[in-house]
Amino acid sequence: MSLALLGFAVAPYMISNFAMAGEVVVPERVGTAMTLLAGATGIGYALGSTLVRTA
C-alpha cells in the first residue's frame, strides 16, 4: 500500500520533468535529453534501493 502512495507522489514529478525536457530542449537533442533522464531515473532507483537495504 505504501508503495502505491509513493508512486502517486513521484509519478507527477517525473512526468513533469520529461514534459519540460521535451519543451525546453532543442528538437535535435530531445532523444538525448530523454535518454539522460531515463538513465538518471535508473541510477536513482539503484541508489535508493542500496540505501534502504543498508539502513
Image: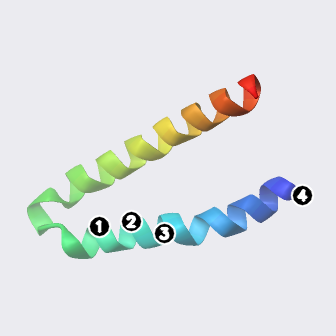
Q: Amino acid at mark 3?
A: Ile
Dot 4 amino acid type: Met
Disc ID at residue 18: 2
Q: Amino acid at mark 1?
A: Ala
| 55 sits to left or right of 34 | right
Task: Please tell me in which quadrant of the rendered image residue 9 appears.
Answer: bottom right
Q: Counting residues from the N terminus, which is met first, the one under dot 4 or under dot 1?
A: 4
Q: Point out the tag, 1 or 3, that comes first from the N-terminus.
A: 3
Q: Residue at 40% of width from left, 67% of height from top?
A: 17
The disc placed on residue 1 is 4
Q: CA distance from mark 2 to mark 3?
A: 5 Å
Q: Residue at x 64, y 27 (%)?
A: 50
Pick the residue in front: 3 or 51.
51
On the image, which quarter does residue 51 sit in?
top right
The residue singled out by tag 3 in the image is 15
CA separation, marks 4 and 1? 31 Å
Residue toward you, 3 or 28: 3
Relative image position of residue 5 (x, y in whole percent) = 79, 64
Residues at circles 2 and 3 in contact by the CB criterion of under 8 Å: yes
Disc 2 crowd, CA 10 A, few/some/many (<14, 14-19, 20+): some
Give the amino acid at mark 2.
Phe
What element does badge 4 sit on? loop
Report crowding for label 4: few under 14, some 14 to 19, many 20 or more residues within 10 A (C-alpha): few
Residue 21: which disc? 1
Say if 51 sits above or below 20 in the image: above
Q: Secondary structure at mark 1?
A: helix
The x, y position of residue 4, in whole percent, is 79, 60
Q: What is the secondary structure assignment of the residue under circle 3?
A: helix
